[in-house]
């Protein structure tokens, strides 16, 4: 009889889902880098992408996206004086984290239901700014609707082991072991939630349409201005390389802005290509929350509705161009007067 101690230990993480479309869509939204930082927690997986410390995108795979989700993390180690139980504390071990190739992970997820995805991708390529809300919903001729269902198993055995994905569909099994790398994720771009200059919530497609209006001018920079006076929310092109100028103003109406709260006039300039990198998130999300702090950092949080699994979120942070001394002199004049926040809430 073989000893049970020879049996391999259970993996640190294992999850099973019946569709990879939501997983793929969420990851594709932060596909602006080659390597992505992965953190496994009890509540789901966190994927963080960073570009030159001026742009950061975070996607979450909540455990609700999976039919089963199990973790087997080491027990926390007790510390303190054993003679005094009151002084003992449990120190939580670090959660599993590593880096993987994002293009390889996306390509692996596309294997599952590739035939169903082909037609949808063709539509996306035809119009880069077409709304893609719930694009992963099965149609009348998808494999899922026709009863050709499958499973996708994702696991991480131990530190330093591959990130494994087992795809089983229509009797065909495909195993992909993605090489993991030592985590080198920098700290999150600082965003001061206690020093918000404004908060705006609107439908994501309005923001996508605004960028589509500005893109033909080939702007180098994008100026985002939020004020208690007109224009309440303005996106304007800038930069010597642009073919003319273009701007889009948002009226403070309930149809456009579900929430509009401004403490101070806020105007910052960003590299247009970095903001444009979030268009995939705008395409699949239903709502977006725009926030700016006192340091000029822009936060975009997208809510993506996944049928049967509740909402998932995508978080982006952008660092603006450095402001030259004296450029904000005119802005200070707009802040005289009532300091109360103006709030307009929609239906």
Image: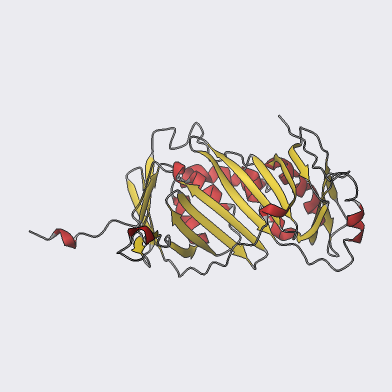
Residue 272 figure quarter = bottom right
In the image, 122 versus 131, the foreground residue is: 131
Which coloring applies here? secondary structure
Q: Position of residue 337 (x, y in %)?
A: 90, 46
Query: Quick check: 39 above or below 199?
Result: below
The quadrant of the rendering that contains the N terminus is bottom left
Would residue 59 be found to the left or right of residue 52 on screen? Answer: left
Residue depicted at 15% across the width and 58% down the height: 4
Would residue 324 be found to the left or right of residue 173 on screen? Answer: right
Residue furthest left as drawn: 1
Residue depicted at 71% across the width and 48% down the height: 290
For residue 141, say whether it is visible: yes
Residue depicted at 52% across the width and 50% down the height: 60
Query: Quick check: 258 above or below 226?
Result: above
Residue 269 figure quarter = bottom right
The quadrant of the rendering that contains the C terminus is top right
Residue 123 figure quarter = top right
């Amino acid at each position: 009889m073989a000893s049970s101690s020879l049996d391999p230990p259970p993996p640190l993480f294992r999850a099973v889902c019946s569709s990879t479309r939501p997983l793929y869509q969420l990851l594709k939204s932060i596909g602006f880098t080659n390597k992505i930082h992965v953190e496994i927690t009890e509540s789901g997986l966190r994927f963080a992408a960073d570009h030159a410390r001026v742009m950061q995108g975070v996607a979450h795979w909540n455990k609700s996206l999976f039919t089963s989700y199990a973790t087997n993390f080491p027990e926390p180690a007790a510390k303190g004086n054993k003679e005094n139980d009151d002084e003992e504390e449990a120190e939580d071990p670090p959660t599993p984290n590593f880096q993987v190739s994002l293009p390889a992970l996306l390509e692996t997820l596309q294997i599952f239901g590739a035939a169903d995805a082909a037609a949808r991708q063709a539509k996306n390529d035809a119009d880069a700014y077409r709304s893609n809300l719930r694009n992963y919903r099965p149609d009348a001729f998808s494999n899922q609707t026709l009863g050709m269902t499958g499973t996708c198993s994702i696991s991480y055995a131990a530190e330093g082991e591959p990130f494994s994905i087992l795809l089983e569909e229509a009797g065909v099994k495909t195993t992909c072991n993605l090489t993991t790398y030592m985590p080198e994720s920098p700290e999150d771009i600082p965003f001061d939630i206690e020093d918000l200059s404004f908060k705006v919530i609107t439908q994501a497609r309005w923001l996508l349409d605004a960028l589509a209006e500005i893109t033909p001018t080939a702007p180098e920079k994008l100026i985002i201005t939020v004020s208690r006076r007109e224009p309440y929310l303005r996106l304007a092109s800038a930069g010597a390389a642009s073919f003319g100028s273009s701007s889009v103003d948002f009226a403070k109406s309930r149809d456009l802005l579900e929430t509009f709260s401004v403490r101070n006039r806020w105007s910052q300039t960003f590299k247009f290509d970095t903001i444009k990198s979030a268009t995939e998130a705008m395409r699949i999300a239903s709502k977006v929350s725009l926030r700016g702090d006192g340091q000029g950092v822009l936060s975009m949080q997208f809510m993506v509705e996944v049928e049967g699994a509740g909402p998932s979120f995508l978080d982006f942070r952008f660092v603006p161009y450095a402001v030259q001394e004296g450029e904000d002199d005119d802005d200070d004049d707009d802040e005289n007067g009532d300091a109360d926040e103006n709030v307009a809430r929609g239906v």
